[in-house]
Image (spheres, grey):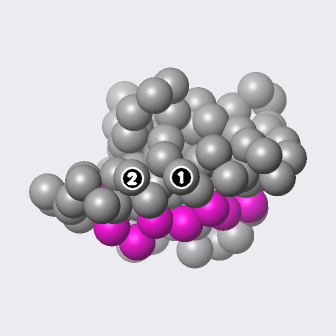
Amino acid sequence: MKILTANRLSDGIAVWYADGGWAETVDHADLAHDKAAEDRLEAIGAKAYTANEVVDVNLIDADVVSGIVEPVRLREKIRAAGPTIRNDLGKQAARAA
């Protein structure tokens, strides 16, 4: 499975395409289960890039764990969670609250 990720151009925040827009959390990102779905997500990313909404647009590998979408690669897990040095900062702190 693949999901679409990017960085929002206005503030650099890592975002994921979900439910017709860019979400700040990966939890419910739209999943591509086949090549046609991947092509659709790539087209969405290209359009958002052209419109100067996002940069560094990529399809990445993901799994669904307990009903929640999670990136596979460590780099993407870090982008989804936030800083690795302090768990009280970033997106992981918001989830704990």
Q: Is residue 59 above or below residue 97?
A: below
Q: Which residue is mark 2?
A: 47
- Residue 40 point in image, percent of width and height: 63, 45
Q: Is residue 58 magenta?
A: yes
Evaluate if marks 2 and 1 touch, with contact meaning CB atoms under 8 Å apart: yes
- Residue 57 point in image, percent of width and height: 46, 65
Q: In the structure shown, which secondary structural element does the residue marked by tag 1 occupy?
A: helix
Q: Tell which of 22 and 97 is nearer to you.
A: 22
Q: Is residue 79 above or below residue 3?
A: below
Q: Residue furthest right?
A: 34
Q: Tell which of 79 and 94 is nearer to you.
A: 79
Question: Which image quarter holds the C terminus?
Answer: top left
Instruction: Give the residue at x 58% y 31%.
Output: 28
Dot 1 alpha-carbon crowd within 10 angstroms: few under 14, some 14 to 19, many 20 or more:
few
Q: Is residue 4 visible?
A: no
- Residue 80 point in image, percent of width and height: 49, 55
Instruction: Give the residue at x 79% y 38%.
Output: 65
Amino acid type indicated by mark 1: Ala
Amino acid type indicated by mark 2: Lys
Q: In the structure shown, which secondary structural element does the residue marked by tag 2 occupy?
A: helix
Q: Main secondary structure of the magenta part?
A: strand
Q: Is residue 94 visible?
A: yes
**Residue 73 appears left or right of 15:** right
Instruction: Give the residue at x 83% y 42%.
Output: 33
Dot 2 alpha-carbon crowd within 10 angstroms: few under 14, some 14 to 19, many 20 or more:
few
Q: Which residue is mark 1?
A: 43
Q: Is residue 44 magenta?
A: no
| Highlighted range, magenta | 54-63
- Residue 83 point in image, percent of width and height: 38, 67
Q: Tell which of 84 and 70 is nearer to you.
A: 70
